[in-house]
Amino acid sequence: MSAATETLVPFDEAISRYDPVMGLEIHIELNTATKMFCGCPTEFGAEPNTQVCPVCLALPGALPVVNAKAVESAIRMGLALNCSIAEWCRFARKNYFYPDMPKNFQTSQYDEPIAFDGHVDVEVDGETYRIEIERAHMEEDTGKALHVGGSTGRIHGADFSLVDYNRAGIPLIEIVTRTIEVPAEKAPAVARAYVSYVRDLIGGLGVSDVRMDQGSLRADVNLSLKPKGSDVLGTRSETKNVNSFRSVERAVRYEISRHAGILDAGGKVVQETRHFQEDSGTTLPGREKSDADDYRYFPEPDLAPVSPSREWVEQLRSTLPEPPAVRRARLQADWGFSDLDMRDTIGAGALDLIVETVEAGTTPQAAKKWWLGEMARRANESGQDIDALGITPQQVAEIQALIDAGRINDKLARSVFDGVIAGEGTAEEVVVSRKLEVVSDDGALGAAVDRAIEGDPDAAQKVRDGNLGVAGALIGAVMKEMRGQADAGRVRELILEKLTS
């Protein structure tokens, strides 16, 4: 059934009768130099099938070897997630067929993960919600199927498919939550906040670049509904590989509405994978979802168990950066932000962007002004996450530096942002090419002031009589004539010199 033919129940109506139950799985590609079980490089964007070898292509007789750096990164991630670290764990074979998996099984961990029983706390609208982590386990990534032809890039309607195995075997950590039950109206926002929190947490560890746009962080959203007051869990769906915070939130909202529509009509939800559609905010069916028994897990015979010593674990614990809550409190104090300022910053996913903008030489207040104002507006209008707009903290800092130097003002800066985002060059180059620099020449400003006074004699007389607040009308006339490129402070000085001296 296509999204267009599905009956949807409005979100508010759905949560009045049903409670959502979520489970989130986050897959994080590690930034190790080589793959999980072989020496192939992991550089993103290489020509297809140039970073492969007999091991990651599963050729007969090729034997894997565990990447020690990947194990170290997995332990540090587990510790950051407040998990216990296994004294002994091993890999297993997860058996299923898909063209982008050359072995026809995935080397993963099943009932013996390296990290387990953790938790994180996320904040939404001033309330804190604890998300319990069931496990964080090591595995290898699959290859990538490219479906050629058709209009969607999906396998349905494609003329043929190609497979790039460069990604096959890249070290992957999968973080799996326990069931998440929060107030129904908060579920989409909590899901988004959790994925954002994990992205910031793992990024701080330096074990992954956590680029959702490049697939190094991907989220799967498991969701089911249960009638209000019932303890019986419904059948779940799993929306795969959602690649932005905004899309995580939208996927939860859509699946709640879709499930409610099926249940209201007396139907049964199919346990299946779903594909999120960025353009429409809907999901489409993938394949019926298997249970663990269907994967026929068994211990990987070609790999020795992993048994990290307690001394090594504690040594790695000492390398962890400050916890996110402590870091946020420190930054809030350093920046002089109010609780509301910090809540808005976190909610917009702008914390690290502001940190990097401040590090590039801008004041915290100026960085907040642009990221929570202009950039947040653009993100909302374009339906993007704020970090996907095509502007970097360094570029924001460069534009603010032009303001601080008096060469542009806030209004002109918005045009500079337009040019930088459009790829017209650096902030300096955009100012020059678009002729955006503030006019501070007294000759040009004085002539414009004379015309404004002549055009509004009533306002001019009121200023002469001591009503200086009316000068704003004359300043506005000058700014309009000069297309916002006048130095407003100097314009005011000239008006008062001409009318009150």
Image (cartoon, rainbow, N blue to C red):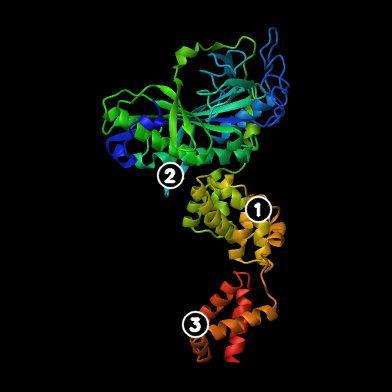
- Residue 90 in view, yes or no: no
- Report helix, strand or loop for mark 1: helix
Q: CA distance from mark 2 to mark 3?
A: 49 Å
* Residue in the foreground of this view, choosing between 9 and 253: 9
* Residue in the foreground of this view, choosing between 8 and 289: 8
Looking at the rendered structure, the kind of residue marked 2 is Thr
Q: Which of the 4 image quarters holds residue 487?
A: bottom right
Left or right of 344? Residue 421 is right
Q: Are marks 1 and 3 in contact (CB under 8 Å)?
A: no
| Residue 369 image position (x, y, % from top left) | 55, 59
Q: CA distance from mark 1 to mark 3?
A: 37 Å
Q: Which of the 4 image quarters holds residue 204?
A: top right
Looking at the rendered structure, the kind of residue marked 3 is Val
Quadrant for the N terminus in the image = top left
Closer to the chain start, of discs 2 and 3, is 2
- Report helix, strand or loop for mark 3: helix
Disc 2: which residue: 128
| Residue 105 image position (x, y, % from top left) | 57, 14
Looking at the rendered structure, the kind of residue marked 1 is Val
Closer to the chain start, of discs 2 and 1, is 2
